[in-house]
Amino acid sequence: MYDHKYLLEFTTGIFMRLGCSRDDAAAVAAVLVAAELRDHSSHGMIRVREYYELWKSGRVNVTPDVMTVHETPSTAVVDGDGCFGMVAGVRSMRLAIEKAAATGTGWVAVRNSNHFGIAGYYAMMALEHNMVGIAVTNANPLVVPTFSVSRFLGTNPLAVAVPALEEPPFVADFATTPIARGKLAVSEKKGEKVPLGYVQDAEGLPSDDPGILRRGGGMVTLGGDRLHGSHKGYCMTAVIDIFSSLFSGANFGPFVPPSVAYLPVPENQPGVGTGHFFGAMRVDAFRPADEFRAAMDHWIRTFRNAKPAKGEERVLIPGDPEREAEERFSREGINLVPAVVQDLKGIAAELGMSFGS
């Protein structure tokens, strides 16, 4: 088990060794460790190897000049200058919050970025300001549209955080595919198969192989197949792709540069880098803040008191499992997959550092 403070310090050190400033390295580390604490290990320390390989291949800028390139009172476009996605993500969400404070809502589109970790991290930044936070991003083109074998979309997550008064906040953070790509990587590291309905092979047939993406296979959208609503998942994934790319001038769909070094960067890109989209909304722009938050308490308690289905103990509110995991892992420590530990030890040794005991 690893203390989260140790992981935060270690990971900050790794990215400083790659050439990041302390602030930028700390931003990357904070999001990765937050993912581990919230039991999203698919977006946690397992990503250090991927980011390290991207850096070695020259596909990420560790000394970026992140700047606002277009702005109105309530909107902005930010160019990440090829940075690690967390660097542009944190700055852009802060800007969205600033604009919301001034105008009621703030919206920031980002281009020329890279993978930014868990979307929920950014959405939750708005909570302490009595705001609703929204974060979406496009991602590696490894997902197939319904009826296709062409890998044209990403897992394209959506996160929404809503403040309450006495209850914990509502935090929805999910990929628009049945499984996140990182969870496929975790299953592969563990030598496990995945359930049918997550991925398909190069011919479009269902597969249980978490490594099928390396052999021309693809991930499917939410629903898995047309019979179970994959066309609706396709719509959600497509909407997020459009918001993440076309407002800012980032790449869309199949042109998004992969965040894994083993996949080539697409040619003839119509945009620049990976795209994100952030929003913040002051709840008091709609009704008094405490009145809204009390109403949110009522909503949460109503759904929490829903009758559980047979065999289930309780009905969860979005954010419950992650919050409970964060409390437990902060207290007990974080358990890393042995293969991830070996990766971290290897990277640390290459950079003149050490990891663990």
Image: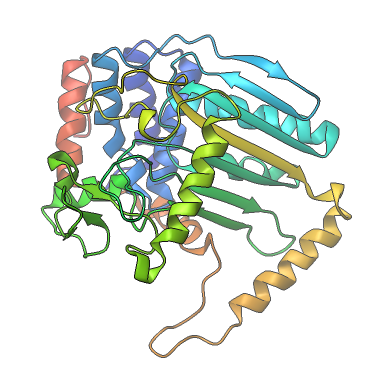
Using the image, determine if residue 166 lies above or below residue 65: below
Residue 255: x and y, percent?
37, 28
Q: Residue furthest front?
A: 147
Residue 60: x and y, percent?
36, 16
Residue 30 shown left or right of residue 303 in the figure:
left
Q: Residue furthest right?
A: 288
Residue at point 88% right, 55% down? 287
Residue 161: x and y, percent?
62, 51
Could one spot residue 332 in this view of the protein? Answer: yes
Number of labelled discs?
A: 0
Residue 335 shown left or right of residue 64 in the figure:
left
The coloring applied to the image is rainbow
Could you say which is closer to the camera, residue 235 or residue 207? 235
Using the image, determine if residue 75 lies above or below residue 280: above
Residue 109: x and y, percent?
61, 29
Residue 253 shown left or right of residue 105 in the figure:
left
Could you say which is closer to the camera, residue 239 or residue 87? 239
Residue at point 61% right, 36% down? 278
Could you say which is closer to the camera, residue 6 or residue 45? 45
Q: Quadrant of residue 247?
A: top right
Residue at point 67% right, 78% down? 302
Residue at point 51% right, 71% down? 316
Could one spot residue 335 in this view of the protein? Answer: no
Using the image, determine if residue 113 lies above or below residue 357: above
Q: Which quarter of the image is occupied by the C terminus? A: top left
